[in-house]
Image: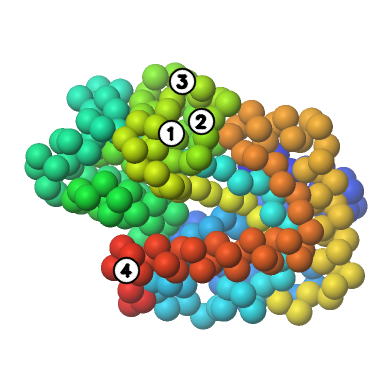
Amino acid sequence: LARAVTPEMSVLLGQQLVMDNRGGAGGRIAAETVYVAPPDGYTLFMASSPCLTIVPHIAKVPYNTLKDFAPVSLIATGDMLLLTPPQSPITGVKDLIARAKAAPGKLNYGSAGSGAANHIGMEVFKGMAGISLTHVPYAGAPQSVIDLIAGRLDVMLGSIPPVLPHVKAGRLRAIGVAGPARSALLPDVPTVDEAAGLRGFHAGSWLGLLAPARTPRAIVARLNEAAARVVRNPVTRARLIAIGGEPVGNSPQEFAVFLRADYEKNGAAARLAGLKAE
C-alpha cells in the first residue's frame, strides 16, 4: 500500500521519498525512530494500527500516540481475512468454532506479534465465539504466512493486500471476511457474521501518514495536500483497491479523530482479551 502512493508523492513534493523498513515489536521500532526524529518534515511515518493504537495498551512504549505524532492523512483502510491452509480439514468458520470447542486449546493461530492487529482480532474472535485457541506470535507477518501455508498453523487473520495472491493461487483458503461486507476481490467469501452469526465482529487494518509532533503546520499541510492528491488520482485509487485497500486520503483533523477512535477501540479490545501492559 505504501509503495502505491510514495512514488507520485515524491514527484509532487520534489523530494525523493525513501522507504526505510524498520520491522519488529509490532511496529514499535519504526514508531520510536520517528518519535525522536527532528520535526522538519524529512522523516515521516507510514504506519498501521499496531504500534500506535494497540501496542501502547499492552506494553510500555516511550511515545504517546495522541501527543507525539502529527497526523497527516489516512491513506487507506481494509478488512482482514480469516485464513486456513488449503489442506486443512477446517472448511468454514462454523467448522473452526466446532472443532475448537471439541478440543479446547489444541488448535493454534499465528499473528505478526503480540499486540499486532491480527492478534487483537483473533482474541476478540475467541471471546465472541466462546472458544480457546493457542496463540503463536511471530516477529512480523511474513514468517507467519509461510508457516500457515505449510500447515504449521491452523488459522490466522491476515490483511488482504499481502495474502490475496496466496488466496488467488490456492496456497491459502479464505473462510471469512472480518468486516461488515464481503470483499469485491473475493465475492464468494462470506463475512464471519454471515458464516457463523458473530454479529459485529470486525478486524481490520489501516495505513496512515504521520510526522513527528511539533512539525510546522505549513509542512503538515503541504504533505497532506500531496498525499490526498495522490490518493484521489484514479490510477492510484485503482491500484489501492486492486490490492485490497479502501482509499481515503482525508485531512489531518479527520485523521486525528480516526486515530483517537481506533486507539480507544483497541484499548477496550485489549482489556476484553485480558491483555495488560508489561
Residue 275, numbered circle: 4
Sequence order check, earlier mark of 2 and 4: 2
Instruction: Please tell me which residue lies in front, 62 or 197.
Output: 197
Secondary structure at numbered mark 3: loop
Task: Tell me what residue is drawn at x 33 percent, y 65 percent.
Answer: 272
- Camera-near label (2 vs 4) is 2
Is 185 situated above or below 126? above
Secondary structure at numbered mark 1: loop
Q: Which residue is mark 2?
A: 182
Q: CA distance from mark 2 to mark 4?
A: 30 Å
Q: Which residue is mark 3?
A: 188
Identified by mark 1, the residue type is Thr
Render colour scheme: rainbow
Identified by mark 2, the residue type is Arg
Mark 4 touches mark 3? (CB < 8 Å)? no
Sequence order check, earlier mark of 4 and 1: 1
Give the x, y percent position of residue 176.
Answer: 39, 33
Image quadrant assignment for residue 34: bottom right
Mark 2 residue crowding within 10 angstroms, few (<14) / some (14–19) / many (20+): some
